[in-house]
């Protein structure tokens, strides 16, 4: 099953580098609102603009889960400014329905971004937030979570990935 409104692996837009957002205007505010909607429907914790076909450095994150209070952000031009440790966690992506794999990434990060209000801010993150921010910034650079996998794990996913590519050509 695909996630409505989310571009699937195989589409070249997921391999493109998104461009710096120069001005926060209605177009950017609308894009953020649309992305929140798509992410919510798909029950994702994060979504990058590439995944809805917009090559803008914009990410939405919502780590609120049921009773667990998390963080909700629109990140414009986000950047990692520090990283510590390393941890393996199971990771998925809305552009890869039904695919998941353990990915190793820094455990704690600092990041900087501009909010929809135009104000720059810095934030320290760990756990699922650190994971989501790193995954989404990767998207803005055309990098996908499968790029972090070793060759053996990638071989195991080969068939599933081929299926997704076929699916993306159809849609
Ligand atoms: Ni993703």
Image (cartoon, grey):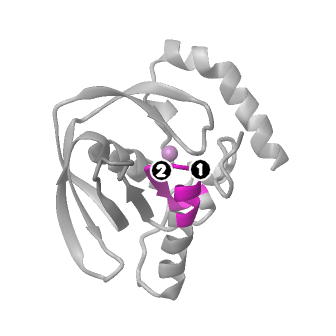
Indicate which disc residue 14 carries: 1
Viewer-proximal residue among 93 and 16: 93
- What residue is rendered at 52% in x and 57% in y? 40
Whether residue 31 can be seen here: yes
Q: CA distance from mark 1 to mark 2?
A: 7 Å
Residue 111 lies, in percent from the top left, at: 23, 57
The residue indicated by pointer 2 is: 139
Q: Quadrant of the N terminus?
A: top right
**Which span is picked out in magenta?**
37-51
Give the answer, above or below, for where 62 lies relative to 109: below
Residue 106 lies, in percent from the top left, at: 24, 35
* Disc 2, SS: helix
- What residue is rendered at 47% in x and 80% in y? 29
Query: Which residue in the rendered view is the most extreme toward the right?
Result: 170
Give the answer, above or below, for where 99 lies relative to 132: above
Query: Which residue in the rendered view is the most extreme toward the bottom?
Result: 25
Give the answer, above or below, for where 130 lies relative to 72: above
**For residue 42: magenta?**
yes
Count of all numbered marks drawn on residues in the image: 2
Viewer-proximal residue among 105 and 73: 73
For the residue with label 2, is its CB less than 8 Å from the closest atom of ligand 1?
yes
CB within 8 Å, label 1 to label 2:
yes
Classify mark 2: residues with Cα within 10 Å, few (<14), some (14-19) or many (20+).
many
């Amino acid at each position: 099953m695909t996630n409505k409104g989310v571009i699937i692996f195989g589409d070249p837009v997921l391999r493109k580098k998104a461009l710096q957002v120069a001005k926060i205007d209605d177009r950017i505010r609308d894009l953020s609102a649309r992305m929140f909607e798509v992410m919510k429907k798909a029950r994702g914790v994060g979504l990058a603009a590439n995944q809805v076909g917009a090559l803008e450095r914009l990410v939405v994150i919502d780590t609120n889960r049921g009773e667990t209070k998390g963080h909700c952000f629109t990140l414009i031009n986000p950047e990692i400014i520090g990283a510590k440790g390393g941890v393996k966690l199971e990771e998925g992506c809305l552009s890869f329905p039904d695919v998941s794999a353990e990915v190793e990434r820094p455990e704690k990060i600092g990041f900087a971004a501009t909010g929809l209000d135009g104000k720059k801010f810095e934030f320290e993150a760990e756990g699922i937030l650190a994971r989501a921010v790193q995954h989404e910034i990767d998207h803005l650079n055309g990098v996908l979570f499968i790029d972090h996998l070793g060759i053996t794990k990638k071989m195991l996913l080969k068939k599933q990935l081929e299926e997704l590519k076929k699916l993306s050509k159809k849609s």
